[in-house]
Image (spheres, grey):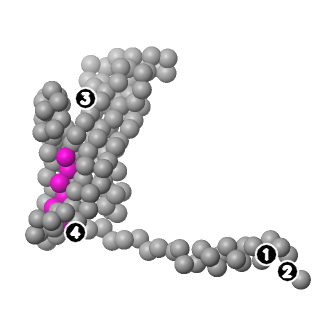
Amino acid sequence: MLARRTVLVGLAAAALAGCQTTPRPAPAIHAIRVDTAPLAAKGQAAIAAAVKPMLERELAGLRTADGRGATLEVTVTGLYLTSYAGGQAVTLGNDTLESVARLIDPNGSEIARYPILAIMAPSYGGAWYRPDVNRRRIEALVAGNAQWIRRALGS
């Protein structure tokens, strides 16, 4: 006589056998465009000008060498740096960077759209008392946002 647990495990394994998925291949990307105009329109023109080359640099590894494939368009829609003076007691929240990554085929139609939200503690930028703390916080957010884009694309 089979134990009840053995029967249940066998039924669960049979039910889940059809759920196995193979990882989808990463799309071939011909070009990468980063648009920070929505961020500049919100009054953050200087930050938008700094974020654009940072994000382009972080995503450059996604580009294929053969020059064929889709275009990755990333639109940065928001960036928020919370008040931070070190320690948990004075931190009022997390830093965030919002973007939308879209894959556009060579004909100009949208293949896929991925809303991306990178959230990090302000301490990811390092010591709060250093003069370049905000730049480092933005760099950490951009790197995190690029990681989420790579993950969404399957890279």
* 3D distance between C-alphas at marks 2 and 4: 51 Å
**Where is residue 13 drawn, in percent x and y?**
65, 75
Q: Do the residues labelled 4 and 1 touch (CB within 8 Å)?
A: no
Residue type at mark 2? Leu
In the rendered image, residue 111 lying in the magenta stretch gets the answer no
Residue 4 position by quadrant: bottom right
Question: Which residue does the image show at 30% across and 30% down from the upper left?
Answer: 80
**Residue named by callout 1:** 6
Name the mark on residue 2.
2
Q: Do the residues labelled 2 and 1 touch (CB within 8 Å)?
A: yes
Residue type at mark 3? Arg
**Residue named by callout 3:** 135
User: Which of disc 2 and disc 3 is earlier in sequence?
Assistant: 2
Q: Which portion, as a residue range, is magenta?
A: 70-75
**Where is residue 39 drawn, in percent x and y?**
18, 35
* 3D distance between C-alphas at marks 2 and 1: 7 Å
**Residue named by callout 4:** 28
Label 3 sits on a secondary structure element that is helix
Q: Which numbered mark, 4 or 3, is in the foreground of this view? A: 4
Q: Nearer the viewer, residue 107 or 96?
A: 107
